[in-house]
């Protein structure tokens, strides 16, 4: 009985969903899905930059969700941080499909089946609600024919889900506005769809802001307090879906949005907002996303319907379908508001107005009703033929086209397999020099992610001053003959150093379908070497040999080689605390790091060797060829090595027996050629900028950006934090270590942990106003304006003044709701 009542209730809410209309709608959905799956099954192209980046994001979330910890706040924070600039809803719904059906790109598109169904359902129901079921059905049919939407059904980016989400929100909002019963149900539907929509992409606000504000104003003017409460409650309730991610990543969202709008518009030469072109840009490109055939037919029909009373005696024009009262004004609010805000966005691209198409489809469908059924179906047939021509197969890779590629396959998977075969125990970063639609850092990174994340692709050599360091820091590079694509000016220098420098050897070459040659290079003597042998496994980790020059110059990088032997798990677990202690004094320096620089794989790559199949039966030898940095202030003399092992799970420290190694620090010694410093050492050096203020920030963060390319998962940051926390327990007054820990937490995007770290910095370096400024900043990042104001007040009480106080004080006041004070103290305020 309960089920029967539910069915009857649904029939009252959706009276048009009968076999007469539901079956054709289902057929439209089936046709769209069949075309999409056939296209994806036939296509042999590799994903371009954006598509590969989003596909990798879905794999990142799939990997993370393999080890859920639903009741851990730390786990949830890390989940939200996994995608700091792009809302992860599309990744979260794709991850289960990867778990069930595999990691291929075709699997990633399975949620698009649901997106298409949602789009067609909401457009149809909106059409039948505002006009007639026929208008709704034709509007839904148009949505599977619009070239702009068809193109993005084949690209795993946010545009198509954004269209479906926008349609769902406007549908539920419209039904709520017009409902006399079931209003609570529509409010819940609006709240859920709004939450999901904002969780899909933040730019959805461009299409929702005006309609929602308009609705609020109408409700207020009509004094409909119950409706006002429902609407505000629905908006507030939506934050339960999207609020957690935005709260965690709000600053990166703001800075990323600026980069995606203002900066991108300047780089692409988009028209100025002061020009007419900026305001007519999307109007002139409507045919591109709708098609000339449908646009002209619909516009012609609208004209006929408008002049029907005048020409009716001469020309027979079908009677137009009725509109629900107020519909024209409501649709105008949605479309004009969306167009206005989209045009205000400095960054222009036809894809950015795709969320307008579901509402436009209703108007176009209404216009088609002016024609007889023969004309309407003729237009649909012609549009379908044009669309089929646009999707026709090609043997030439055309990344900007929707044509299905049936040519030769690309060698990306083979490149990854070759790297994995040579380094089966290590995570590898591949330096990708070309940046074309077919070969770039994003799609090679994607294929590496599909291989259990054993290879990461990164573009290096971007800045001229970093070229030498980039070449020295990576062991694998890939180059391409012919046009390298959108590459920096340093490209030729990078290629010359790799091909002619003598440090790399060519491993393999592949022919690309376009005729170019893809070449894989490997360093002749890599910084990390692994030898796996069957036989007796050592009971504990052993440091068998250390090689270092007998005399070293302080303040310069010094080459050092560590040779380790141990069980597979021992090699990968824990951190090594390396101390070079003066034999007859208190001076020392540290070289703490993880063995293999945290590149060790928990599970080796699959292969035929016994050690890859069952690493517990083998012992492993690891050779690390690194560089350390003795401080320039060291007292000359003899220094000896001591090594300890920090266990990650327990935090226990145990000594490791090491060979007796002595080195002399001599200011008269000659500097010796050395590899790049390990990333932990580089970060500790960069952190020394913090106590000096903000002048060195630009270069500091440029260097951090560089070294983060070498460790794509930034595991070295955790190593810095863990090792220095132990060191600070032993020497709690070391400000340089405290600043390094705080910087590492900031780079880990953990403002909550950075607050604790900077509180310690303030306790150690309390006479430095910048210590209080940094504490204020991280409190603001974590939405603690009162704590930030307290830190600012303490810092301002110090004798030394810094120019950043007004900005910080104003930001804290604004975040705390004190707008008057913010206006007074901000640089653009009343002062």
Image (cartoon, helix red, strand yellow):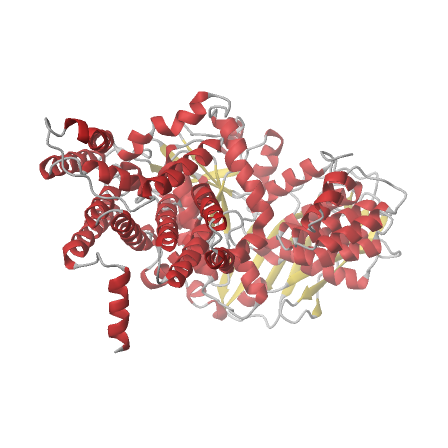
Tell me the quarter of the image containing the N terminus. Answer: bottom left
Q: Nearer the viewer, residue 361 or 114?
A: 361
Q: Residue drawn at (78%, 41%), measured in percent from left and top?
A: 805
Q: Residue drawn at (73%, 57%), measured in percent from left and top?
A: 757
In this rendering, position of residue 759 left or right of residue 102: right
Q: Residue drawn at (38%, 55%), measured in percent from left and top?
A: 176
Residue 604 vertical position relative to residue 39 in the rendered view, above or below = below
Residue 240 pos. (x, y %): 51, 60
In this rendering, position of residue 235 left or right of residue 358: right
Q: Nearer the viewer, residue 246 or 338?
A: 338
Instruction: Name the quadrant containing residue 651.
Output: bottom right
Residue 302 pos. (x, y %): 23, 32
Residue 618 vertical position relative to residue 668 in the rendered view, above or below = below
In this rendering, position of residue 77 left or right of residue 226: right
Q: Most extreme residue toward the right, as rendered?
A: 799
The answer to whether residue 444 is seen in the rendering is: no
Q: Most extreme residue toward the bottom, as rendered?
A: 1
Tell me the quarter of the image containing the C terminus. Answer: top right
Residue 490 pos. (x, y %): 54, 28
Q: Nearer the viewer, residue 614 or 4?
A: 4
Query: Total number of numbered labels?
Result: 0
Residue 81 vertical position relative to residue 616 in the rendered view, above or below = above
Instruction: Name the quadrant containing residue 669.
Output: top right
Residue 745 pos. (x, y %): 66, 54
The answer to whether residue 345 is seen in the rendering is: yes
Instruction: Name the quadrant containing residue 463.
Output: top right
């Amino acid at each position: 009985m309960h089920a029967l009542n539910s069915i009857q209730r649904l029939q009252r809410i959706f009276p048009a969903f009968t076999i007469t209309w539901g079956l054709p709608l289902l057929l439209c959905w089936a046709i769209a899905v069949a075309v999409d799956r056939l296209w994806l099954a036939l296509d042999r192209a590799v994903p371009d930059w954006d598509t590969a980046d989003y596909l990798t994001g879905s794999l990142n979330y799939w990997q993370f969700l393999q080890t859920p910890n639903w009741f851990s706040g730390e786990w949830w924070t890390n989940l939200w941080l996994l995608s700091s600039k792009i809302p992860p809803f599309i990744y979260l719904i794709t991850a289960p499909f990867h778990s069930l059906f595999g990691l291929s790109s075709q699997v990633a598109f399975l949620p698009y089946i649901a997106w298409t169904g949602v789009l067609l359902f909401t457009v149809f129901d909106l059409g039948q609600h505002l006009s007639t079921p026929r208008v709704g059905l034709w509007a839904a049919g148009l949505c599977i024919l619009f070239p702009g939407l068809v193109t993005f059904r084949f690209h795993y980016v946010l545009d198509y889900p954004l269209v479906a989400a926008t349609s769902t929100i406007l549908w539920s909002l419209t039904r709520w506005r017009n409902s006399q019963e079931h209003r609570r149900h529509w409010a819940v539907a609006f709240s859920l769809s709004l939450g999901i929509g904002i969780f899909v992409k933040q730019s959805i606000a461009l299409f929702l802001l005006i309609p929602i504000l308009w609705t609020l104003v109408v409700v207020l003017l009509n004094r409909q307090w119950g409706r006002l409460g429902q609407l505000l409650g629905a908006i507030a309730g939506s934050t339960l879906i999207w609020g957690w991610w935005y709260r965690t990543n709000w600053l990166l969202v703001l800075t990323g949005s600026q980069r995606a709008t203002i900066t991108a518009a300047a780089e692409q030469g988009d028209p100025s907002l002061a020009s007419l072109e900026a305001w007519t840009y999307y109007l002139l490109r409507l045919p591109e996303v709708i098609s000339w055939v449908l646009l002209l037919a619909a516009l012609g029909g609208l004209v006929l319907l408008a002049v029907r009373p005048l020409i009716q005696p001469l020309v027979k024009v079908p009677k137009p379908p009725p509109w629900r009262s107020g519909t024209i004004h409501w649709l105008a609010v949605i479309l004009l508001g969306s167009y206005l805000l989209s045009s205000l966005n400095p960054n222009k691209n036809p894809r950015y107005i795709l969320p307008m198409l579901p509402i436009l489809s209703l108007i176009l469908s209404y216009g088609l009703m002016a024609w007889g059924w023969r004309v309407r179906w003729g237009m649909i047939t012609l549009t379908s033929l044009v669309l089929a021509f646009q999707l026709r197969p090609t043997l030439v890779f055309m990344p900007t086209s929707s044509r299905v590629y049936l040519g030769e396959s690309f060698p990306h998977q083979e490149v990854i397999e070759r790297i994995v075969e040579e380094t089966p125990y290590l995570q590898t970063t591949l330096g990708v020099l070309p940046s074309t639609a077919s070969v770039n850092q994003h799609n090679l990174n994607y294929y590496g992610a599909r291989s259990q994340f054993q290879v990461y692709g990164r573009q290096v050599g971007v800045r001229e001053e970093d070229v030498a360091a980039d070449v020295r820091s990576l062991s694998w590079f890939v180059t391409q003959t012919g046009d390298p694509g959108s590459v920096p000016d340093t490209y030729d220098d990078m290629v010359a150093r790799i091909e002619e420098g003598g440090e790399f050897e060519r491993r393999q070459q592949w022919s690309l379908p376009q005729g170019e040659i893809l070449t894989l290079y490997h360093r002749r003597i890599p910084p990390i070497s692994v030898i796996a042998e069957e036989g007796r496994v050592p009971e504990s980790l052993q440091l068998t040999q250390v090689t270092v020059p007998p005399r070293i110059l302080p303040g310069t990088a010094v080459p050092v080689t560590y040779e380790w032997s141990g069980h597979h798990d021992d090699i990968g677990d824990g951190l090594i605390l390396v101390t070079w202690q003066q034999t007859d004094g208190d001076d020392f320096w540290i070289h703490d790091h993880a063995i293999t620089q945290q590149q060790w794989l928990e599970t080796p790559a699959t292969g035929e060797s016994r050690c890859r199949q069952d690493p517990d039966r083998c012992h492993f030898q690891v050779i690390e060829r690194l560089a350390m940095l003795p401080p320039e202030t060291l007292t000359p003399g003899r220094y000896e090595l001591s090594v300890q092992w920090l266990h990650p799970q327990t935090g226990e420290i145990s000594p490791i027996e090491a060979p007796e190694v002595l080195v002399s620090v001599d200011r008269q010694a000659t500097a010796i050629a050395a590899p790049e410093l390990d990333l932990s050492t580089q970060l500790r050096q960069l952190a020394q900028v913090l106590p000096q203020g903000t002048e060195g920030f630009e270069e500091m963060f440029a260097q951090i950006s560089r070294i983060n390319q070498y460790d794509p998962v930034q595991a070295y940051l955790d190593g810095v934090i863990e090792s220095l926390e132990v060191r600070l327990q032993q020497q709690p007054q070391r400000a340089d270590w405290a600043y390094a820990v705080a910087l590492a937490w900031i780079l880990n995007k953990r403002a909550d942990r950075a607050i604790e770290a900077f509180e310690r910095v303030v306790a150690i370096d309390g006479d430095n106003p910048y210590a209080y400024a940094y504490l204020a900043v991280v409190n603001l990042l974590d939405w603690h304006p009162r704590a930030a104001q307290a830190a600012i007040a303490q810092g301002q009480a110090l004798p030394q003044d810094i120019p950043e106080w007004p900005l910080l004080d104003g930001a804290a006041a604004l975040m705390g709701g004190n707008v008057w004070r913010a206006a007074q103290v901000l640089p653009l305020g009343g002062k």
